[in-house]
Amino acid sequence: MLGLGKTTLARKVFKHPTMEYKFLVRAFVEVSAEYKAKEVFLKILHEIGVYTKEMRKNEDDLIQAIIDYLKHSRILIITRNKPVAERARKGSDPYGLRFLYFSESQELLRKNLATKNSQST
């Protein structure tokens, strides 16, 4: 669903110092609804620092290069497209988000404000 904060949450997790330490090889790639697989593979390789002119090979070679570099990593896929999530899953069902209830939204805002106030003092 649009507007739930999926990408914002994923970006926060991606940039968290614990994740940077635990997963030295990482990539954050956003893919639009209209995409070309080869371009996505090249973006991933660029993000993990192995993008070279030699990588401009066929898709199978690009996929193998990604597998080689990310074989010990976890992959987090954020999508509003349920069939994509179901196809990408391995060993667990996709986690569906919902909009917060008004009271939950208020509580979240209160906690964020309290955190920001404590950091500024």
Image: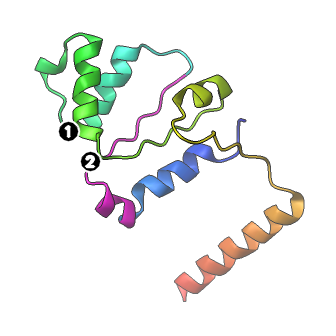
- Secondary structure of residue under mark 1: loop
Q: Residue furthest top?
A: 58
Are discs 1 and 2 less than 8 Å apart at CB? yes
* Residue 18 higher or lower than 31, as above or below: below
Which region shows up in magenta?
Answer: 18-32
Residue, x 40% and y 16% (percent of image)? 37
Q: Residue furthest front?
A: 91
Q: In the image, 120: left or right of 96?
A: left
Question: Residue at the location (81% across, 54% down)?
Answer: 100
- Residue at the spot of label 2: 25
Front residue of 64 and 3: 64
Image spot of residue 107 (x, y percent):
79, 71
In this rendering, the count of numbered labels is 2
Q: Mark 1 = which residue?
A: 49
- The single residue placed furthest to the bottom in the displayed view is 121
Decide if residue 89 is on the left or right side of residue 62. Answer: right
Q: Earlier in the sequence, mark 1 or mark 2?
A: 2
Q: Which quadrant does the N terminus fall into?
A: top right
Q: Local crowd at mark 1 within 10 Å, few (<14), some, or many (≥20)?
A: few
**Dot 1 amino acid type:** Gly
Which quarter of the figure has residue 104?
bottom right
Q: Residue at x 70, y 75 (%)?
A: 111
In which image quadrant can residue 29 be found? top left
